[in-house]
Amino acid sequence: VRPRPVEEVLDDLHQLTALVDHPHIAFADAVFNDPAGHWRELLAAMASADLKLSWTAFFQPAEFSRDDCRLLKSSGVSGLEFGTDGSNDAALRGLNKPFDFSLVQRIQRQCVENEIPAAHYLIFGGPGETSATVEEGIENIDRLEGCAAFISTGLSIYPGTPLAELARREG
């Protein structure tokens, strides 16, 4: 993670809001909610600046505190996009994700309770996927209330990654 200084981001946002009435920002970041918490510092500054904008970003599934939910809303969030990827624990393990599907369900419940729109991006066909895991995954997705689900099949395999090595071993 290489965060930009909060002041620089705020300067950009102030310039944008001077040019466009109520702009919508999509932060282009694979994991906006970095583990070090830089995202909270940025959102607190955005909330304090009382910018007239809405925003969204890609988040890795991770639980939010009550304060996080208040901060998301006060900073102008219009929705959260989660790189959930797997629709059940087997698929998540196959993708080496650091969370299980029960966490995904808890996060989605938090979003609904706090009236924060959410979308989950899910992939079928990863390592270890079977007909049974696909059926379980569809059932799990159906249980995610109040969200959009963007579902795709297949994975991009990049050289030098564990996924590339697995694909090579499996022929």
Image: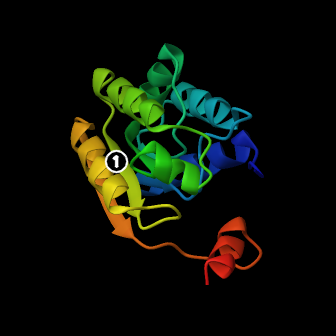
Where residue 24 appears, as percent x and y from the top left, is: 39, 52
Q: Say which residue appears at 78% left-offset and 52% top-offset.
A: 2
Circle 1 residue = 119
Q: Along the horizontal axis of the image, is 110 left or right of 71?
A: left
Looking at this view, name the residue that lies furthest to the top. 66
Describe the colour scheme in one phrase.
rainbow
Q: Say which residue appears at 48% left-offset and 30% top-offset.
A: 50
Where residue 76 appears, as percent x and y from the top left, is: 42, 35
Quarter of the rendering occupied by the C terminus: bottom right
Q: Nearer the viewer, residue 128 or 52?
A: 128
Q: Is residue 110 above or below residue 90?
A: above
Q: Along the horizontal axis of the image, is 2 left or right of 148?
A: right
Please tell me how crowded label 1 is: few (under 14), some (14-19), or many (20+) other residues with Cα within 10 Å: some
Q: Nearer the viewer, residue 48 or 121?
A: 121
Q: Say which residue appears at 48% left-offset and 15% top-offset.
A: 66
Q: Along the horizontal axis of the image, is 50 left or right of 133?
A: right
Q: Is residue 5 above or below residue 115?
A: below
Where residue 46 appears, as percent x and y from the top left, is: 56, 34
Where residue 107 appears, as percent x and y from the top left, is: 42, 30
Dot 1: element: strand
Q: Nearer the viewer, residue 107 or 117?
A: 107
Q: Say which residue appears at 57% left-offset and 33% top-offset.
A: 43
Looking at this view, name the residue that lies furthest to the bottom. 171
Q: Nearer the viewer, residue 99 or 57?
A: 99
Which kind of residue does numbered mark 1 sit on?
Ala
Q: Along the horizontal axis of the image, is 162 left or right of 50?
A: right
Q: Is residue 22 among the parts visible in the rendering?
A: no
In terms of image quadrants, where is residue 106? top left
In terms of image quadrants, where is residue 78? top left
Q: Is residue 8 among the parts visible in the rendering?
A: yes
Q: Is residue 43 above or below residue 69?
A: below
